[in-house]
Image (tube, grey):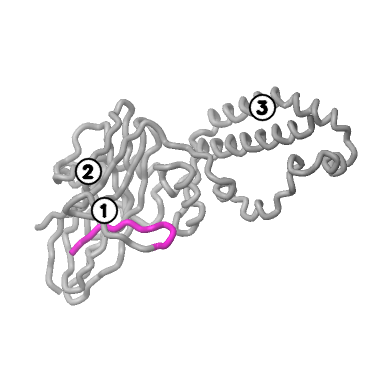
Amino acid sequence: MAIATYALSLSIAQGERISSGSSADRDKLLEKPGITDKKPKLAGNVPRAQVAEVNTGIPDLSLVEIGEGYGELIVKADAILDNLIKRVGVLDYIFEPTQHPMLAEAVAETFAGAPLNKISYKMYLDVLRLDKDLAIAIGEQTHESLR
Amino acid sequence: MIKIYTQNETTGGFSPVSSADFSAPIIASTRPGGTAFTKRVFIRNDDPSTYYTDIALRPTTFNGLPISGSVIRVKLLSGSKAPEDFRWDAVGANGSESVDPAVCAILQSPMGVGAADTRLPELGVEGTPDNKYYPFWVRIEVGKGAPYETLMLGLSVSYTENAI
């Protein structure tokens, strides 16, 4: 009887790296294909006069007040996400990478070292947080443009 | 010769895993106490002039020795679909002299004895080679407190080689 041994390299690292990736990567992970093609033009990218017109005549002052009041909303949203992961943190979505190659690629690019056939609920929430952070950044940019 | 292969998830192409060195290993990574690493790999005979019986596949150190301790736990299951957690929970980890998949990680030929996901087919029969790729899964759990390092492990395949 013969024996052959094949190489298996195991890296034990401090933590799985989570990068924000590109918006296209995040859309793939969130299964929102094509959303970038339909994204409306951001208010922060157009002149202020046009913004007011786009927002159907709502006074700029109201928008500023709403913008300044979102801090508590963020705190509550984070609390909800934390509560969710405690309650359903064991949920995993297992998929076949060969049937969902784009999803596997997005997982590989966003969560280095993670299995390519699974999205855990924690990974899903991490992506939601990244998406939330991006939305906040866009909102803050828009807010500044209204001042 | 029997070989182990990885598959490019994007292109679908197969790449042989190196046997004599770490030039092309199966690459696994995880963190202590973190999510288990799971990867699908393949076993195949690339030689149409031979067939293989009495195949047994075990996780080992790269020197072919059993993996000691319980901090690093390597498990094996066969099949094209990713095994569910209850199946991983039902099989043993690492290697030993045992051939009981409930005690240690082992995939054996032929099919038809015990649970199908703990078996491998024999690769060909007399007069008929079998050069297909057969999938199996490697799962690696690393317990809390494990040092940060890169370990050189192995998958050892024992077999009887027969001429077609």
Q: Determine the residue located farthest toward the left in the rendered image.
A: A1
In the rendered image, residue A31 lying in the magenta stretch gets the answer no
Marks 1 and 2, how far apart at CA:
13 Å
Q: Chain of mark 2?
A: B
Which residue is at the front of the view, B77 or B157?
B157
Both marks 3 and 1 on one chain: no
Which residue is at the front of the view, B133 or B119?
B133
Residue at the image position 69 percent from the left and 24 percent from the top: A71
Residue B153 badge: 2
Contact? badges 1 and 2 (CB < 8 Å): no
Residue type, label 2:
Leu
Label 2 CA crowd tier, 10 Å (few <14, some 14–19, many 20+):
many
Residue B24 badge: 1
Where residue A104 sits: x, y (%)? 47, 51
Residue type, label 1:
Ala
Which residue is at the front of the view, B145 or A34?
A34
Q: Which type of secondary structure does the marked residue at label 2 adopt?
A: strand
Marks 2 and 3, how far apart at CA:
46 Å
Residue at the image position 65 percent from the left and 51 percent from the top: A36
Label 3 CA crowd tier, 10 Å (few <14, some 14–19, many 20+):
some
Dot 1 or dot 2: first in sequence order is: 1
Q: Chain of mark 3?
A: A
Which residue is at the front of the view, A60 or A77?
A60
Residue B125 badge: none
Q: Residue at label 3?
A: A74
Q: Which type of secondary structure does the marked residue at label 1 adopt?
A: loop
Q: Determine the residue located farthest toward the front in the rendered image.
A: A47
- Please state the extent of the stretch shown in magenta in the rendering: B1-12
In the rendered image, residue B11 lying in the magenta stretch gets the answer yes
Both marks 2 and 3 on one chain: no
